[in-house]
Amino acid sequence: MGFPGTWMTESETVVYRVVPKCACSTIGQILYYSDHGQFFDGDIHDAKDGLHKWALEHSQGPITRNVQGQQSYAFTCVRNPYTRILSSFFDKICGIQRNGKRYRGNLVPKLAYEYGIEVGGDDGKQEFDQIASFRRFLLFARDTIRWRRPMDPDIHWSAMSGHVSTFILNGGRYNRIFWTEAFNDGMQGVLNAIETPHPVDLAAIPRFNESEGHGPKRAHPVEEYFDDLSMHLVYEIYKRDFELFKYDFENPANKMPVGEIDLDEVHAKLGE
């Protein structure tokens, strides 16, 4: 299995396990900058050099050696499951992707037909009932995760604990897991723990939100998208995420964590 979704600076100062929809574009650019003193020109997910990535064959040896030997500081970043699944819906389902096409080709027509989901027309700009469509999407997401039907779950809405666990199961250990909602504190903690070839002034770093503008704007507060049934579905899908990363299941309006992440607990429960 190896270390899918794992990135490492070429200088091997730090190792990062990507969790989709959790500030990964910004984090990737910070890692790139820390080695090269400049940002990657484009979406960091497209970079084929300047940063080790598990998806690049030449990076797999160095990543495996480093992570299994626990030679560098390793971290990841997580996000409130309610806002993460909402973001996935607006970006991946309603939005037009950076290649000018719909995400995963025929996925959206399939969802429209099988689940009655609307996405705001061909360009994602028309008015539609966001709440009704999102709740139908939630049924689809649950079906993919629970029964792998009508397709395997997508990385953008599969549970964060699943992403985080592959790193542990193959011999890695996290030094830090922080929240997107307290990004500056968390990322600064990582930077304080490592020596980078180029200093990084976090206050001066722009936010690289590559999904911004792909889809329609969210028209309602987060909590309005989740009734009792959809909260139940979210808990069914993301129970472990709420528990391990200390988010508030009871109140979708509260995006902030309600406790501290216990790294020993994470390693024990996700390393089984």
Image (cartoon, rainbow, N blue to C red):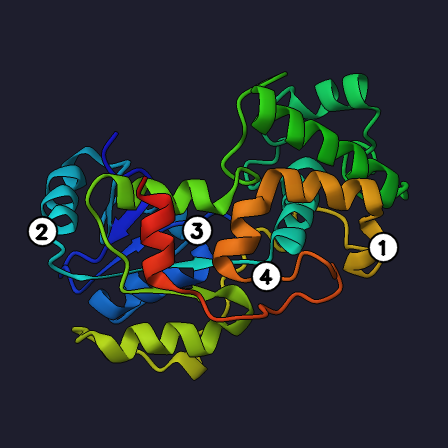
Numbered disc 2: secondary structure:
loop
Hey, what amino acid is under mark 3? Asp
Question: Which mark is on residue 224?
Answer: 1
* Residue occupying image coordinates x 84% and y 24%: 116
* Residue occupying image coordinates x 72% and y 58%: 250
Q: Which residue is mark 2?
A: 69
Nearer the observer, 211 or 224: 224
Q: Who comes first in sequence, dot 4 or dot 1?
A: 1
Which image quadrant is residue 107 in?
A: top right
Hey, what amino acid is under mark 1? Glu
- In this rendering, which labeled residue sits more in front, label 3 or label 1? 1
Q: Which residue is mark 3?
A: 43
Q: Which residue is mark 4?
A: 247
Q: Who comes first in sequence, dot 2 or dot 1?
A: 2
Residue 177 in the image: above or below residue 170: below
Numbered disc 4: secondary structure:
loop
Contact between marks 2 and 3 (CB within 8 A): the answer is no
- In this rendering, which labeled residue sits more in front, label 2 or label 4? 4
